[in-house]
Image (tube, rainbow, N blue to C red):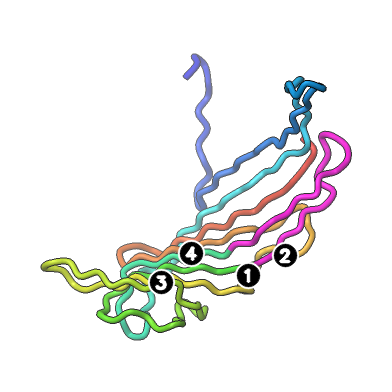
Amino acid sequence: MPKGMAISYGTAGDGRQTAKSYEWLAVQDNEGITQDNILKHTRTETTTETVESTWGCPTMDGDEVLNATITWTVQEAVIDASASGTAPQAVRFYDPRCEASVTYLGSTNQDSTFSFDGVTFDTVSSEIAETLGDVKKVTVRGIAYEENNGLVTGSALSGTIRKEKRFSNTDYVRTTETTISFSGS
């Protein structure tokens, strides 16, 4: 660290990560050699993590859950503005979905659907793990479409694009939320 550089500490409470990316357009000459980069727009993502007051995992069909993750996401399409250094003309957020991975104590594979934390998922895969001297565990993965949990959909230049909820039977529930915004610089 350079001499005299101050150290900054985060605030108390939620964890936070902010990332800023610059979208560039490479400009080539008539022989295809890149001569310059032009700034199209910038994109800022802020992810906030919160430790909830709930301890452990809910059960699934009466079985003890060891850990689980539920993730809500949307796709995005960017229509750039015609001027450099300008926020996009439009950003469209679409195809909201919710995906889950749940590991629980059990001995049979999951049916074609399952419910966890108030969401009903179509089963994508179900695997039973039998380790010598240990209990049988089932890991099931699923997806539910049109479950957006407050994510931005339609056209917007900012909004929440991702949420995640992590459960562990040895910790508090943790949630993260990622918001996005576009600008010219």
Distance, label 1 to label 4, CA atoms, is 13 Å
For the residue pair 124 and 21, the one nearer the viewer reads as 124
Q: Point out the stretch of residues depicted in magenta.
A: 73-95
Distance, label 3 to label 1, CA atoms, is 22 Å
Q: Residue at (55%, 69%) from the top-left corner?
A: 98
In this rendering, is residue 125 above or below 155?
below
Tell me the residue that label 2 is attached to: 153
Q: Earlier in the sequence, mark 3 or mark 1?
A: 3
Q: Which of marks 2 and 4 is nearer the N terminus?
A: 2
Residue 116, percent from left and from top: 45, 78
Front disc: 3 or 1: 3
Tell me the residue that label 4 is attached to: 165
Tell me the residue that label 1 is attached to: 148
Q: Residues within 10 Å of mark 2 (few under 14, many from 20)?
A: some
The amino acid type found where label 3 is placed reads Ser
User: Mark 1 falls on what kind of element?
Assistant: loop
The amino acid type found where label 2 is placed reads Thr
Front disc: 2 or 4: 2
Distance, label 2 to label 1, CA atoms, is 8 Å
The amino acid type found where label 4 is placed reads Lys
Tell me the residue that label 3 is attached to: 125
In this rendering, is residue 83 above or below 174?
above
Distance, label 2 to label 4, CA atoms, is 20 Å
For the C terminus, the image quarter is top right
Q: Earlier in the sequence, mark 2 or mark 1?
A: 1
